[in-house]
Image (tube, rainbow, N blue to C red):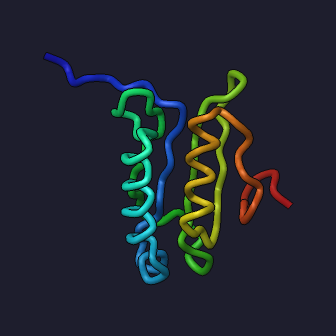
Amino acid sequence: MPPKYFKTRGHLLVCQGPNCKARGSDLLYRALWTHLERHSLAYYKTGGSVRLTESGCLGACSYGPTLCVYRERGGRLEEGWYAAVDFPLSEAVARAVHEEAELPRERRYGPGEG
């Protein structure tokens, strides 16, 4: 029997590289995971749609914790990169993904960012 497939609206990755961990990314990941589960936003919950994964280094080592999000929007792949992420910002990103809304601009960096 093949594994069960869960449709998602987006995928969040929280860096667990050594510099981000020193800035609390492991605690951020656990807090965000708990939030997604409690509010039925986690992809495997009824009505949930957000996938969350720990990742290796995302390359913004001096600005951690860093978070990256990928989702399909308007027929194309959209990505968002965030530096110095705290729980309120991570929750706002997850909520935007779940609601298919605009991603927050706060602390965003990378291509197309000022």
Q: Residue furthest right?
A: 114
Q: In the rendering, at what x and y percent does residue 40 appear? A: 41, 39
Report whether 6 appears left or right of 28: left
- Look at 19% across and 19% down and name the residue there: 2
Report whether 80 appears left or right of 18: right
Q: Residue furthest top?
A: 1
- Look at 34% across and 33% down and name the residue there: 44
Quarter in which the N terminus is drawn:
top left
Relative to 63, is 100 above or below? above
Q: In the rendering, at what x and y percent does residue 112 appear? A: 81, 51
Report whether 96 appears left or right of 108: left
- Look at 36% across and 26% down and name the residue there: 6
- Look at 38% across and 48% down and name the residue there: 38
Report whether 82 appears left or right of 50: right
Residue 25: which quarter of the image?
bottom left
Q: Which residue is more in the foreground, 98 or 79? A: 98
Quarter in which the C terminus is drawn:
bottom right
Q: Which residue is more in the foreground, 32 or 75? A: 32
Q: In the rendering, at what x and y percent does residue 111 appear? A: 76, 53
Q: Residue furthest left?
A: 1
Q: In the rendering, at what x and y percent does residue 84 appear? A: 62, 73
Q: How many marks?
A: 0
Relative to 40, is 88 above or below? below
Relative to 96, is 63 above or below? below
